[in-house]
Image: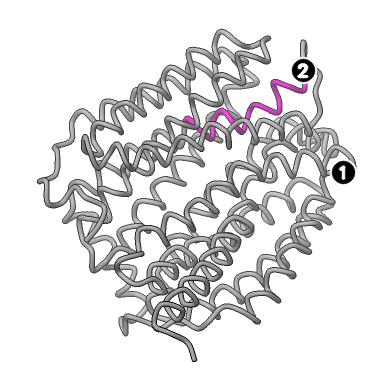
């Protein structure tokens, strides 16, 4: 006969197991929008007649993710998230199949847009974690799943670079299909159903997000700051493979992908931002994070031929961008606790629109101005983030915490 203590321990184990599954879902799904970044030079070699607009591939993927956030993520309040996750996995596998078999760059671009839209599975996993966990463990639950999402973002480039180096870029998309099918089988066996929390019609769900953006000044400020910083982040990562492919490096996609591990090492410091935000306030951490991101592009500008300099810059950039994201999210979740999914959607849509703009600017600047031009553009994006942040107003103390 079990005791209350043993029941509690078993419940904790069960919750931890589900959180690990949700973290895996978040990481494996979001990785799909970053697989293409270390493969850009391989795309250029496969489609030489379209080499001048290779940079459109990551741009369309980022735009697709922003569109998917806007159009699909709010459905988690209306329908069973488990079913939504499985349906999106099935559709994502089809999009990946088209990408793997793309006969020309046009098909790859369209497939990349679809991949971006459907990879928003991760945005169902985070609120699902908050639903499954008791209030006393909600912060831990969301943090666990966000860690999986962050590792997926950073290690996707490493996985894609390794597979692309030895098996070719088409095999990267094929390997992702296999991983998603295995994940779907585990979801069917282990993940419970969720309970819809809204009966609003689809149109009204979307409309309510506009009202939140208008109502909440802090949400608008955090979204603009996050978008500008993620633009700088995506600008760097969408051009790094092109820099490493040329003189003096002459490295293939595997080395470009290995920078994802460097980024992951830098991002391990990001969770500390949450603790510091509790002590000093999230705005102070955002200020420091913007300064670090700006510093990273100064380092990049001086490191166009230095691998060590690039490694240092990546660590500083990832600490800055991830620290700002965690702090900004701790701010916005406290603004409207009863509408956290939709508040998060507004923030993340702006975030990935910024990422798409950054990738697009990288595609424009790189052939005209080279690495120094990329570094200056990144510095300008961080300046936009800094000016927007300085214009903002601190939230009242009661609204600045991340917990209810």
Q: Nearer the viewer, residue 132 or 128?
A: 132
The reply to whether dot 2 and dot 1 touch (C-beta < 8 Å) is no
Considering only vertical position in the picture, is 37 above or below 64?
above
- Magenta span covers which residues? 232-245
Disc on res. 246: 2
Residue 60, magenta (yes or no): no
Tell me how far mark 2 sits from mark 1, CA to CA.
19 Å
The reply, left or right, for residue 306 in relation to residue 336 is right
In the picture of the structure, the residue carrying the numbered disc 1 is 168
The reply, left or right, for residue 228 in relation to residue 106 is left
Scheme by which the image is coloured: one colour
What secondary structure prevails in the magenta region?
A: helix
Residue drawn at (46%, 78%) of the image: 6
The reply, left or right, for residue 236 in relation to residue 271 is right
Residue 71 x/y as whole percent: 45, 66
Residue drawn at (66%, 30%) of the image: 259
Residue 362 x/y as whole percent: 57, 28
Between disc 2 and disc 1, whose residue precedes? 1
Assign a secondary structure to mark 2.
loop
């Amino acid at each position: 006969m079990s005791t209350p203590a043993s029941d509690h321990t078993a419940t904790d184990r069960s919750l931890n197991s589900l959180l690990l599954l949700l973290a895996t879902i978040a990481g494996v799904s979001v990785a799909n929008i970053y697989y293409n970044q270390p493969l850009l030079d391989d795309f250029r070699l496969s489609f030489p007649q379209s080499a001048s607009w290779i940079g459109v591939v990551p741009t369309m993927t980022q735009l697709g993710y922003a569109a998917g956030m806007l159009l699909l993520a709010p459905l988690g309040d209306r329908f069973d998230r488990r079913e939504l996750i499985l349906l999106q996995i099935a559709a994502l596998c089809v999009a990946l199949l088209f990408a793997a078999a793309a006969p020309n760059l046009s098909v790859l671009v369209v497939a990349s847009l679809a991949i971006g839209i459907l990879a928003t599975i991760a945005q169902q996993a985070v609120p699902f974690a908050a639903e499954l966990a008791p209030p006393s463990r909600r912060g831990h639950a969301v943090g666990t799943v966000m860690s999986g999402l962050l590792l997926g973002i950073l290690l996707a480039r490493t996985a894609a670079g390794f597979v692309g180096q030895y098996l070719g870029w088409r095999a990267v998309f094929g390997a992702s299909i296999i991983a998603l099918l295995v994940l779907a089988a585990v979801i069917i066996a282990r993940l419970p159903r969720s309970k819809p929390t809204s009966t609003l019609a689809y149109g009204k769900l979307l409309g309510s997000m506009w009202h939140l953006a208008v109502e909440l000044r802090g949400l608008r400020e955090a979204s603009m700051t996050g978008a500008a910083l993620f633009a700088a982040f995506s600008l760097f990562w969408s051009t790094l493979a092109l820099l490493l492919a040329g003189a003096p490096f002459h490295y293939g996609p595997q080395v470009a992908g290995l920078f994802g591990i460097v980024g992951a090492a830098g991002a391990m410091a990001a969770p500390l931002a949450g603790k510091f935000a509790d002590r000093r306030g999230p705005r102070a951490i955002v200020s420091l994070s913007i300064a670090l991101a700006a510093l990273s592009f100064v380092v990049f500008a001086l490191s166009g031929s230095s691998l060590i300099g690039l490694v240092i810059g990546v660590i500083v950039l990832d600490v800055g961008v991830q620290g700002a994201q965690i702090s900004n999210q701790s701010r916005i979740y406290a603004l409207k606790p009863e509408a956290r999914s939709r508040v998060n959607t507004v923030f993340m849509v702006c975030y990935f629109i910024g990422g798409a703009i950054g990738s697009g600017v990288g595609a424009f600047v790189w052939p005209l101005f080279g690495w120094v031009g990329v570094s200056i553009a990144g510095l300008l994006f961080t300046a936009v983030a800094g000016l927007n942040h300085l214009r903002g107003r601190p939230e009242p103390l009661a609204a600045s915490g991340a917990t209810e």
